[in-house]
């Protein structure tokens, strides 16, 4: 088992229950993107995520004419503060015409009660219309697909619509702007629950940018993964991310990705904006920061897990980067 896999398996993370609520004429992309993100968090990072699918319909058809069902009975699902109910988007014209009214109103009491119990709610694309119909977005920041915005603001005037945001967070309710932004929202939630390292690994696995919003720094280590795609560079980054303690030489790394050392160095800088040495050091220090935040390891143990030959080397590089010793990590 790679060292980072072992570290992640030792982490005492809360188990998360992710429930996808299906309505007729659901959009497959709104559903599939977030499902894949949460699945990969469990598959490659050992995150304790349980995914289930529910509906008040026995079976239904997606807007793309795919039949779906049967589903888990909503009334049999146990919900608590570690639960997240996701509502993928539905066909906007069907919603606006009232075609989905009966199906939506079956879900409203359940959604309201789930939120009262402490469950978190999330919508993808026009799924925000369903939450708004239930009164759950009143006086909350929210967003939805750009084609729905005017209708959204007119029909639900108590909602604080954020037209410039690709996703929002307000008191346990999350909304996203539509289609692929469900992936961004799911990655944001992974970072919130399990840390930036996990979110970046999942983003890398599904070959999408690791996006951040608000006051987050644009100069983030994991943003280096989104400067373009080259399979050999992604593979090199994966090796450096997953095995910081292995400390492969340039020649060994080049051999593993089937490039010459010179060609690897040139391509790595082209696609990441950094040298291999710079990226390696940032990976180690980022991992060191996360291990320090757990408060379970000594500086000596952390230095070893991060691939440093001595704790002294780790302390020196940490202080060069952050200006304070590791013992003052809370201020970083």
Image (cartoon, rainbow, N blue to C red):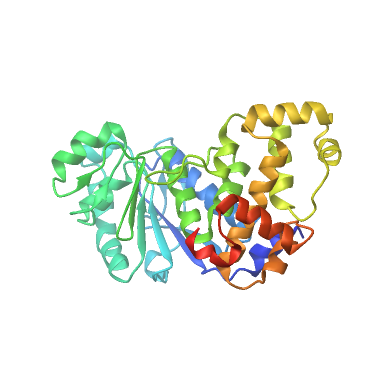
The total of numbered circles placed on residues is 0
User: Could you say where residue 321 lies in the image, as x and y percent from the top left?
Assistant: 59, 50
Among the 4 quarters of the image, the one containing residue 222: top right
* Residue located 57% across and 47% down the image: 200
Q: Where the N terminus falls, by quadrant?
A: bottom right
25 to the left or right of 288? left
Q: Is residue 318 above or below residue 273?
A: below
Q: Is residue 1 visible?
A: yes
- Can residue 102 be seen here? The reply is no
- Residue 77 falls in image quadrant: bottom left
Camera-nearest residue between 150 and 31: 150
- Left or right: 84, with 170 as reference point: right
Q: Along the horizontal axis of the image, is 219 left or right of 166?
A: right
Residue 76 placement: quadrant: bottom left
In percent of width and height, residue 104 lies at 27, 52
Which residue is located at x 82 percent, y 38 percent?
250
* Residue 175 position (above or below residue 254): below
In percent of width and height, residue 317 lies at: 66, 53
Height in image: 312 above or below 206?
below
In the foreground, 188 or 72: 188
Answer left or right for 169 relative to 40: left
Q: Residue at x 68, y 37 (%)?
A: 234
Picture residue at 69% right of the left edge, 64% below the top: 302
Across and down, in percent, residue 128 comes to: 29, 47
């Amino acid at each position: 088992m790679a060292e980072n896999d072992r570290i992640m398996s030792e982490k005492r993370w809360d188990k998360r229950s992710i429930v996808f609520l299906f309505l007729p004429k659901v959009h497959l992309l709104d559903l599939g993107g977030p499902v894949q993100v949460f699945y990969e968090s469990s598959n490659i990072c050992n995150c304790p995520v349980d995914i289930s699918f529910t509906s008040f319909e026995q079976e239904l058809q997606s807007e793309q004419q795919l039949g779906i069902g049967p589903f888990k009975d909503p009334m049999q699902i146990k919900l608590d503060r570690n639960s997240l109910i996701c509502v993928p988007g539905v066909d906007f014209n069907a919603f606006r015409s009232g075609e989905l009214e009966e199906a939506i109103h079956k879900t409203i009491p359940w959604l309201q009660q789930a939120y009262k119990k402490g469950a978190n709610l999330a919508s993808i694309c026009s799924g925000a219309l369903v939450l708004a119909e239930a009164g759950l977005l009143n006086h909350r920041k929210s967003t939805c697909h750009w084609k729905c915005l005017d209708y959204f603001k007119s029909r639900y005037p108590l909602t604080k619509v954020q037209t410039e945001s690709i996703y929002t967070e307000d008191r346990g309710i999350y909304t996203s702007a539509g289609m692929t932004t469900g992936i961004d929202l799911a990655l944001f939630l992974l970072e919130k629950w399990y840390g930036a390292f996990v979110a970046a690994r999942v983003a890398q696995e599904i070959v999408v940018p690791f996006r951040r919003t608000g006051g987050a720094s644009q100069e983030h280590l994991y943003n280096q993964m989104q400067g373009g795609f080259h399979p050999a560079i992604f593979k090199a980054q994966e090796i450096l991310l997953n095995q910081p303690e292995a400390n492969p030489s340039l020649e060994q790394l080049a051999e593993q990705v089937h490039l010459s050392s010179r060609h690897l160095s040139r391509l790595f800088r082209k696609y990441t904006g950094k040298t291999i040495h710079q990226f390696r050091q940032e990976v180690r220090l980022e991992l060191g920061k996360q291990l320090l935040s757990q408060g379970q390891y000594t500086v000596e143990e952390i230095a070893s897990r991060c691939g440093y030959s001595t704790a002294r080397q780790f302390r020196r590089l940490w202080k060069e980067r952050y200006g304070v010793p590791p013992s003052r990590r809370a201020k970083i």
